[in-house]
Structure formats: structure tokens, C-alpha cells
Image (cartoon, grey):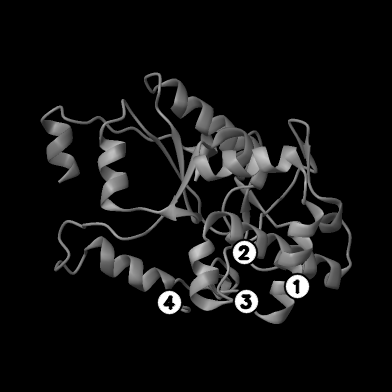
């Protein structure tokens, strides 16, 4: 279907290889996450350079979309909205995803797989069946999906960071640079529950929160009570999502 659209001049598609923006002999694009845990995180330098290069080829008004489980569900209505835009830069993250600093500086909206119409839903090679196989533990050859979004207490994932410690003035949180396992786990859960409350409150309304997660959410909200700067940031994050 996409090939036909390209042949007819309805749409043009291009790719940008992050490895083309690396400087080491191994063309490394990922590294271990700060704070430990399974999986790898896509490095900020090559990913930012790749996004910048892809964006430069797009017409003005083309948003940068990160395909992320932390985003709003992709619906048919959203597909219609995107179809009217002059262009799109789609960023696909593998492993544990993008370094959070790339999302903060280079991404306009985050969108997750959701309710929409697929072509060839009865095909053995259809996207729907591929999606199903990919999310099943063991099918992808790794246990990492168990620690990702919606797998930890039904919450969205926490932010991920990898080397370098500082990138474009943004620094990896100090708690992740230390070796205190309990502090790291508490920080991650607090980030996960706060992110879920901000972006997908329907998940909390649907499944509720365990006692430890509910306590951290109360703590998060109490810390920001009366903070006008945070309220503005919250409104912006809702618009971005």
C-alpha cells in the first residue's frame, strides 16, 4: 500500500540512519542505562543528529513524532489529523527507547500504538500479528519487555538515561548516578506513577494504584502544590501528548 502511494506521488518517504552520525569505529548507537536494569538506551548524540538531519528535509510545520508507549494512543482520528500535515518525522525507539534528554529537546509529540484501522488484518504478515508476537515475553528473544511500560504495576515507563552524563546542558539525575538500589527503584516508580497520572490518567482510573505507588503520587502532587512553573509545564505536556 505504501509502495503504491509512493509510485503515484501521493507521499514521499525517506530514512535517516543514526549510525551515520556516530564517531567511533563500531558505530555505536546505544549504551547501558544509568541506574542499571535490562536493555539498552539509545544514545543522545547520534539520535539527536539523526533527528535534526531528517527534520531538515521536511517542510515547515512538520512535527517530530516519537513512537513511544508513553504517548497518547494512535487512533483513526489522529491518523486523519496527521494526514493533513505537510510532513512528519517519525522516530522509532528500540530497546529501552530514547535518552530522555532527546525527547525533551527534539520531540514534539509522543504517540503509542492504539485503536486504529490496519490494512491486511487477515494477512499472516499483517502488522497486527507482528505487534502481538513482539510484545510476548520470549518471542523477542529477551526478557526486557517485562520491565517496560504497562508491565510495572500497570504504569507507563520511567525516563531512561545513558552516557554521557551531560548533554546540551541537560544532566542525568544524580540518583541514577549513585549505586543505591532502593533509592533508584523508588525514583523510577515515582517517575512512572507521575508520568501515568499526567499522560494517561485513564490507566489509573481503570486499574487503580498499589499502596506504594499511591503514596508516591501523593508525594509528587504535594511537592508541586502551588508551583505555577510546574502547572505551566503540565499544560504544555498535555498539549504535546
| Inter-mark Cα distance, 2 to 4 | 16 Å
Q: Is residue 213 visible?
A: yes
* Mark 1 element type: helix
Nearer the observer: mark 3 or 2; the answer is 3
| Inter-mark Cα distance, 1 to 4 | 31 Å
Nearer the observer: mark 2 or 4; the answer is 4
Nearer the observer: mark 1 or 2; the answer is 1
| Inter-mark Cα distance, 3 to 2 | 26 Å
For disc 2, the marked residue is 39
| Inter-mark Cα distance, 4 to 3 | 24 Å
Disc nearer the start of the sequence (4/3): 4
Disc nearer the start of the sequence (2/4): 2
For disc 3, the marked residue is 209
| Pointer 3 local density, CA inside 10 Å: few below 14, some 14–19, many at least 20 | some
Place of residue 92 in the rendered image (x, y in percent of width and height, measured from the top left): 45, 47
Residue at 56%, 76% (x, y): give it.
143
Q: Are marks 3 and 2 in contact (CB under 8 Å)?
A: no
For disc 1, the marked residue is 215
Work out whether 179 lies above or below 214: above
Amino acid at each position: 500500500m505504501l509502495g503504491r502511494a509512493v509510485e503515484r506521488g501521493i507521499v514521499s518517504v525517506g530514512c535517516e540512519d543514526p549510525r551515520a552520525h556516530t564517531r567511533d569505529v563500531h558505530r555505536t548507537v546505544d549504551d547501558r542505562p544509568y541506574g542499571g536494569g535490562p536493555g539498552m538506551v539509545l544514545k543522545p548524540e547520534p539520535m539527536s543528529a539523526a533527528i535534526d538531519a531528517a527534520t531538515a528535509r521536511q517542510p515547515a510545520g512538520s512535527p517530530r513524532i516519537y513512537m513511544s508507549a508513553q504517548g497518547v494512543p494512535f487512533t483513526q482520528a489522529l491518523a486523519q489529523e496527521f494526514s493533513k500535515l505537510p510532513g512528519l518525522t517519525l522516530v522509532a525507539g528500540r530497546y529501552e527507547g530514547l535518552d530522555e534528554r532527546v525527547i525533551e529537546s527534539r520531540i514534539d509529540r509522543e504517540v503509542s500504538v492504539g485503536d486504529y484501522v490496519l490494512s491486511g488484518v487477515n494477512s499472516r504478515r499483517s502488522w497486527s500479528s507482528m505487534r502481538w508476537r513482539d510484545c510476548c515475553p520470549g518471542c523477542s528473544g529477551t526478557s526486557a519487555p517485562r520491565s517496560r511500560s504497562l508491565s510495572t504495576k500497570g504504569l507507563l515507563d520511567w525516563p531512561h538515561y545513558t552516557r554521557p552524563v551531560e548533554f546540551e546542558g541537560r544532566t542525568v539525575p544524580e540518583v541514577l548516578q549513585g549505586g543505591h538500589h532502593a533509592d533508584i527503584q523508588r525514583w523510577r516508580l515515582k517517575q512512572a506513577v507521575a508520568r501515568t497520572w499526567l499522560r494517561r490518567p485513564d490507566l489509573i482510573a481503570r486499574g487503580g494504584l498499589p499502596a506504594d505507588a499511591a503514596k508516591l503520587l501523593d508525594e509528587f502532587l504535594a511537592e508541586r502544590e502551588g508551583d505555577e512553573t510546574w502547572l505551566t509545564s503540565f499544560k504544555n505536556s498535555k498539549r504535546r501528548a
